[in-house]
Image (cartoon, helix red, strand yellow):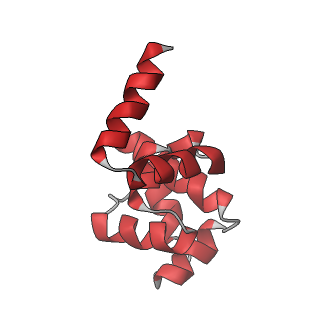
Amino acid sequence: MDYNEIVDRVGYFREKAGLSQRELSQRLGYNPQFIETIETKRVQLKISTLLDICNIVGVTIFDFFYLGKKYNEERKEFLDLFLSLSDDKKDAVIKLLKSN
């Protein structure tokens, strides 16, 4: 994943949360054009800002990087359930999936 995709995901999750660039900028405590400057790549996105954005739009950093534009609740539920399994059960699920 490159920087352009990260910035695209910021816009995707911002829109999914129903926030304008201006509103997200203000919730972050910056000037109203701040998110626009990130999404148009005129300034670099800091990791701390990305974490704050994820918090505001209601996604975990895991969801941000691993689900991205393919984000949907069914996949999230599946991943959450899978991650809660014991290692033995995870291995059994993986073996079952590979057998199909």
Q: Is residue 92 above or below residue 88?
A: above
Q: Nearer the viewer, residue 83 or 1?
A: 83
In the image, what residue occupies the spot 36% across and 40% down?
A: 90
Give the quarter of the image for residue 46: bottom left
Does any portion of residue 99 appear in the rendered image? yes
Compared to 76, does 61 lie above or below?
Answer: below
Name the quarter where the N terminus is drawn.
Answer: top left
Label count reads 0
Of residues 38 and 54, which is closer to you in this image? 54
Residue at position x 54%, y 82% in the image = 27
Residue 2 visible in this rendered orientation of the protein: no
For residue 9, side relative to residue 85 (left or right) = right
Residue at 51 percent across and 45 percent down: it is: 68
Q: From this viewpoint, which residue is outermost toward the bottom?
A: 29
Q: Residue furthest right?
A: 18
Q: Horizontally, is 10 left or right of 3 in the view?
A: right
Q: Position of residue 17 (x, y in %)?
A: 65, 64
x and y percentages locating residue 49 in the rendered image: 36, 70
In depth, the one of 31 and 16 nearer the eye is: 16
Residue 20: image location, x then y, percent: 66, 67
Residue 32 horizontal/vertical position (percent): 56, 77
In terms of depth relative to the viewer, which is nearer, 62 or 23? 62
